[in-house]
Amino acid sequence: MTEHTEMGVLAATLDDIVQSPTPKVDEAVACRGKLSTLLDYHLACEGRSIYPALAASQEHAVVTAGEDFVRELETLSIDWQAYLKEWTTDVIGFDWGGFAGETRSMMVRLRDRIDRETHSLLPLAVRVSAIPLKAHY
């Protein structure tokens, strides 16, 4: 399973968990933890290989696209960290509805980012030889 696929599955699973009217705090925290660990790993890999290669490209459009992806990622990362900090296990248990709403919104953003990476970023990375054609992202 590629990282993008695995992140998408975890995001969908978390989305399903928060649909429950009855709090499933332990399930939500466990799934979110797996997703967060995978995101950290994935973003570190991109930061080491893809973004520097895009920045070094001779094509202005590739450099600009890479810069746009980095800015978007920085915003999403800040928001993700704030979400993790705000929604502790205790707070989730106290305000399941609020957590569910924020989680659904965050999962929409995350899935959109995964789709954009899959359809735009990865083809650029292949183009500048930052990753092999069959890389498992």
Image (spheres, grey):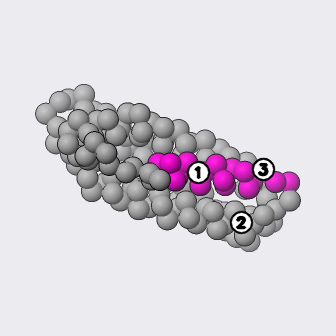
Question: What residue sits 41% from the left and 40% below the top?
Answer: 117
Q: Amino acid at mark 3?
A: Gln
Is 51 left or right of 12, judged from the image as shown? left
Does the stretch in magenta take in 42? no
Q: Amino acid at mark 2?
A: Glu
- Farthest right residue in view: 22
* Mark 1 lies on residue: 9
C-alpha gap between disc 1 and disc 3 = 15 Å
Tell me whether circle 2 and circle 3 mark residues in contact (CB < 8 Å). no
Span of residues in magenta: 4-21
- From the image, give the main secondary structure of the stretch colored magenta: helix
Q: Nearer the viewer, residue 28 or 6?
A: 6
**Mark 3 residue element:** loop
Which residue carries the number 2 mark? 27
**The one of 86 and 12 positioned closer to us in this rendering:** 12
State left or right for residue 46 relative to residue 31: left
N-terminal label among 2 and 3: 3
Give the residue at mark 3. 19
Q: Is residue 134 left or right of residue 92?
A: left
Real-space CA distance between mark 2 and mark 3, rounded to the nearest whole angstrom: 12 Å
Residue 86: x %, y % from top left: 64, 62
